Image: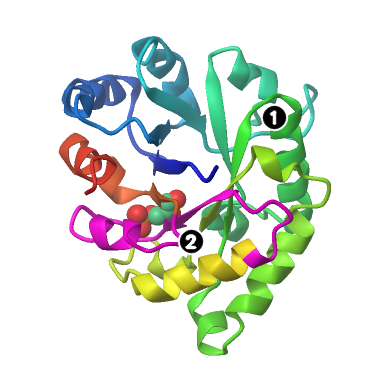
Amino acid sequence: MRNIVIAGNWKMYKTQRESSEFLQGFMPELGQTPEDREVILCTPFTDLGVMSKNLQNSRVQLGAQNIHWEDEGAYTGEISGSMLTEIDVRYVIVGHSERRQYFGETDETVNKRLLAAQRHGLIPILCVGETKEQRDLDQTEAVITKQLTKDLVDVDQQQLVIAYEPIWAIGTGDTCQTDEANQVIGMIRSQLKVADVSIQYGGSVKPNNIDEIMAQPEIDGVLVGGASLEAQSFARIVNYQ
Ligand code: 13P
C-alpha cells in the first residue's frame, strides 16, 4: 500500500530546548489527525535523544538527517545506524540536495548510506531532484533517472520512501506547480520495481498549498523544511484536508 508520509526536515535548526517547546505546541494539534498518515520529524542529531523520550507512545516517528555506511569506525563527525536505532529512530533522510551540494555527497555514497540504513532496519527517505539550470535545459527526467539508477543499486524498494525535491523550489517560496510535481513523481514511479513506494514532494510546502499538493494522485506525502519549524504551521500541513 502507498502510505501517506508527512515529514518535517528541521535541517540545522532547533536546540534541545527549542525542540521540546515545539512539541508542546505541536502534539495537542494531533488529536483529530486521521490515522492514515505517518507523521515524522527529522531533527538534528543532538535533538534525537530528548525527542525520542518525548515522543514515546505518540504517533510521531523520529527521523535522522544522515547515516554513515559503516557500522562503526574511525569516521570523525559521522553517525552509525545502531546509534540511531538505539534511540528509536525509524527513518533517515539520505541524499538531500544540501548534502549533495555542500558536503560532496555523490550517488555512490548515497547508495552506500541507503544500504546501511536498511541493514539497520531504518527506512530511508531518498531525495532526488534537478537544479533550475537542468530544468531549463529540459534535463529533469534524465537527471532523476541517473540518480535513481545509481542510488538504488541493491536497495530494497519495499523499505523505502522517495522525496522528489526540485532544488529550485527548496527554501525559495517558488513551489513547483502541483501538476508538474505530479507528473515528475509519476515518472519516478514508472522507473521503480515496486509499485507502492511512497513518493513525497518537497520544496516550499506551506499551509496554504498543502491541500492542493495532496490532491494530486501521484503524490503520497510531503517533505517540509521551513514550514515544519513552527508548531501551528506544521500541524496545519499534517492535518491537510
Ligand atoms: P523548504 O520546505 O524550506 O523549501 O525545504 C524543503 C526541503 O529541503 C525539505 O527537505
Label 2 residue near ligand 1, CB within 8 Å: yes
What residue is rendered at 35% in x and 38% in y? 13
Whether residue 176 can be seen here? no
Vertical position of residue 136 compared to residue 234: above or below? below
> Where is mark 2, residue-wise?
165
Q: Position of residue 195 (x, y in %)?
A: 64, 54
- Image colouring: rainbow
Q: Position of residue 98 (x, y in %)?
A: 52, 55
Residue range in magenta is 190-219
Q: Is residue 210 magenta?
A: yes
Label 1 or label 2, whichever lies nearer to me, is: 2
Residue 76 numbered tag: 1
Residue nearer the viewer, 44 or 121: 121
Quarter where residue 157 is shown: top right
Q: Position of residue 175 (x, y in %)?
A: 33, 69
Q: Main secondary structure of the magenta part?
A: loop
Position of 23 compared to 165: left or right? Answer: left
Residue 180 numbered tag: none
What residue is rendered at 46% in x and 26% in y? 62
Position of 146 compared to 60: left or right? Answer: right
Residue farthest to the front, as pictured = 1
Label 2, secondary structure: give it.
Answer: loop
Q: Is residue 148 magenta?
A: no
Q: CA distance from mark 1 to mark 2?
A: 29 Å
Position of 97 compared to 109: left or right? Answer: left
Around disc 2, counting alpha carbons within 10 Å, would you say few (fewer than 14), some (14 to 19), or many (20 or more)?
many
